[in-house]
Image (cartoon, rainbow, N blue to C red):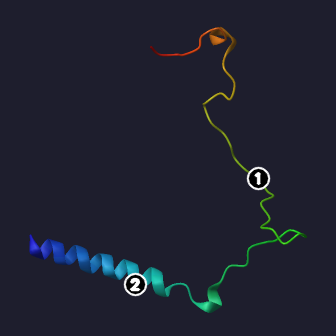
Amino acid sequence: MTIARNCLLLLLAAVTSRRCFSHRAGNEVQVPRTEAGQPDLRGVWNFSTNVPLERPSAFADKKLFTR
């Protein structure tokens, strides 16, 4: 049990240290900005879902779907 625990802790330490040292000053990502200085969120956004945004007309009079 202690060998497995030590291996897990060693793996966790390796992953954590890699994430900490991967952010170097030369690798900073430049976020596109709008003219007002805000992050530019324009682009193609995919909001495909099977959930309708409006209640179907068959259920218009029901207050709740379940008991």
Q: Residue at x 80, y 65 (%)?
A: 40
Q: Is 23 rendered above or below residue 2? A: below
Residue type marked 1: Val
Q: Secondary structure at mark 1?
A: loop
Residue type marked 2: Ser
| Other residues around mark 1 within 10 Å, as few (<14) / some (14–19) / many (≥20) | few
Mark on residue 28?
none
Q: Residue at x 67, y 16 (%)?
A: 56
Image location of residue 7, percent across then percent down: 20, 77
Mark on residue 17?
2
Q: Residue at x 79, y 56 (%)?
A: 43
Residue 28 in the figure: left or right of residue 41: left
Image location of residue 26, percent across then percent down: 64, 91
Q: Is 2 rendered above or below residue 44? A: below
Whichever of labels 2 and 1 marks the residue nearer the N terminus, that label is 2
* Direction right: furthest residue: 35
Spatial CA span between label 2 and label 1? 35 Å
Residue 21 in the figure: left or right of residue 36: left
| Closer-to-camera residue (48/62) | 62
Image location of residue 15, percent across then percent down: 37, 78
Is label 2 or label 1 in front? 2
Mark on residue 44?
1
| Other residues around mark 2 within 10 Å, as few (<14) / some (14–19) / many (≥20) | few
Quadrant for the N terminus in the image: bottom left
